[in-house]
């Protein structure tokens, strides 16, 4: 299985999973040009995507969706709340399927949604099984539920938000209401919260941690990586950073 981060951050989020001829896109937050360009960089094309899964309706996760669906009639999966929040007519007009709490099979992948705590209609994380491997993808959540915590511990690849450094956020330039929103229980995960999850990922299953949705204002890649590295202690787990305008990492398990 191959995992490619096409973009990750406060402006745009998208990642691609590939196994054999099946390709799953999780979130379509890049504009269509940026999405096509990022796909080209890894030798992929929009029309070859088998399904799109959306975590929630915020623009940095859905910006390119409408244009993508005009180019290729790809089935879209999300919670009913997310689908309705994108546009009231969306469920009628497109090949859109509500997740309804059940697992969805796409080729060799089995995808399950887990609720997260974020100020959107019905946001989720995804647990994606492929053979013996599990990828858990969670960004945009203010808290980590026990179920999500467990999912990470059992994962081969963890794509986890490491949005902000708590001190940088507190002392940074954002207005007070925005600071409270980001740090709140329906905001975003800090480096410290992410480290608390990673500390329990010593089950011997995990091979890669991908730190996602880093804030460009309230974090620094070195701080996020050092915090995760310290939490993972001496475990043989690779820690990868993501960026807003660079494709990567490209992982194979
Ligand atoms: Zn986001
Ligand atoms: Zn969001």
Image (cartoon, rainbow, N blue to C red):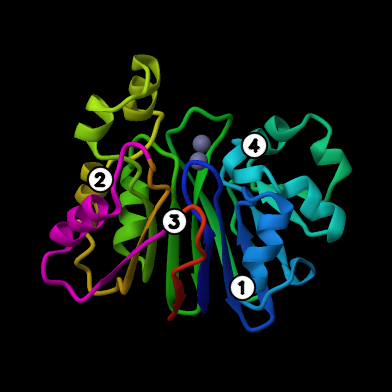
Give the image location of residue 91, x and y in percent: 80, 40
Q: Residue at x 47, y 67 (%)?
A: 248
Q: Which numbered disc flags the more N-terminal residue, 3 or 2?
A: 2
**Disc 2 beta carbon < 8 A from ligand 1?**
no
Q: Which numbered disc flags the more N-terminal residue, 3 or 1?
A: 1
Q: Dot 1: what SS?
A: helix
Q: Is residue 19 above or below residue 10?
A: below
**Residue wearing tag 2:** 191
Q: CA distance from mark 3 to mark 1?
A: 15 Å
Give the image location of residue 234, x and y in percent: 11, 71
Q: Is residue 230 magenta?
A: yes
Question: Label 3: how many residues lie within 10 Å, few (<14), some (14-19) or many (20+)?
Answer: many
Label 2 close to label 4 by CB (< 8 Å) = no
Q: CA distance from mark 3 to mark 2?
A: 16 Å
Q: CA distance from mark 4 to mark 1?
A: 29 Å
Q: Residue at x 39, y 43 (%)?
A: 216
Question: Label 1: how many residues lie within 10 Å, few (<14), some (14-19) or many (20+)?
Answer: few
Q: Which mark is residue 41?
A: 1
Q: Dot 3: what SS?
A: loop
**Residue wearing tag 4:** 82
Q: Which mark is residue 243?
A: 3
Label 3 close to label 1 by CB (< 8 Å) = no
Taking the image as shown, residue 17 lies to the left or right of residue 31, namely: left
Taking the image as shown, residue 168 lies to the left or right of residue 96, namely: left
Give the image location of residue 85, x and y in percent: 68, 30
Q: Dot 2: what SS?
A: helix
Q: CA distance from mark 2 to mark 4?
A: 27 Å
Q: Residue at x 36, y 66 (%)?
A: 155
Give the image location of residue 52, x and y in percent: 68, 57
Quadrant showing the C terminus: bottom left
Question: Label 4: how many residues lie within 10 Å, few (<14), some (14-19) or many (20+)?
Answer: many
Q: Dot 4: what SS?
A: helix
């Amino acid at each position: 299985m191959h995992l490619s981060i096409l973009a990750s951050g406060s402006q745009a989020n998208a990642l691609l999973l590939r196994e054999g001829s099946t390709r799953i896109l999780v979130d379509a937050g890049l504009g269509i040009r940026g999405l096509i360009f990022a796909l080209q960089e890894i030798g992929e094309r929009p029309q070859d995507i088998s399904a799109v899964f959306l975590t929630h309706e915020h623009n940095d996760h859905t910006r390119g969706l409408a244009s993508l669906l005009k180019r290729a009639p790809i089935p879209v999966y999300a919670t009913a709340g997310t689908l309705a929040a994108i546009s009231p007519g969306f469920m009628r007009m497109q090949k859109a399927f509500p997740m309804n709490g059940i697992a969805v099979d796409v080729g060799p992948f089995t995808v399950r949604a887990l609720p997260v705590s974020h100020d959107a209609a019905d946001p989720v994380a995804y647990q994606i099984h492929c053979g013996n491997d599990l990828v858990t993808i969670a960004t945009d959540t203010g808290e980590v539920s026990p179920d999500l915590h467990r999912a990470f511990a059992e994962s081969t690849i963890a794509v986890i938000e490491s949005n902000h450094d708590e001190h940088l956020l507190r002392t940074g330039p954002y207005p007070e209401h925005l600071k409270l929103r980001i740090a709140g229980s329906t905001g975003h995960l800090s480096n410290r919260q992410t480290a608390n999850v990673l500390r329990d990922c010593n089950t011997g299953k995990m091979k890669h941690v991908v730190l996602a949705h880093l804030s460009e204002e309230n974090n620094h890649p070195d701080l996020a990586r050092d915090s995760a590295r310290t939490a993972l202690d001496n475990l043989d787990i690779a820690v990868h950073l993501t960026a807003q305008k660079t494709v990567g990492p490209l992982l194979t398990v």
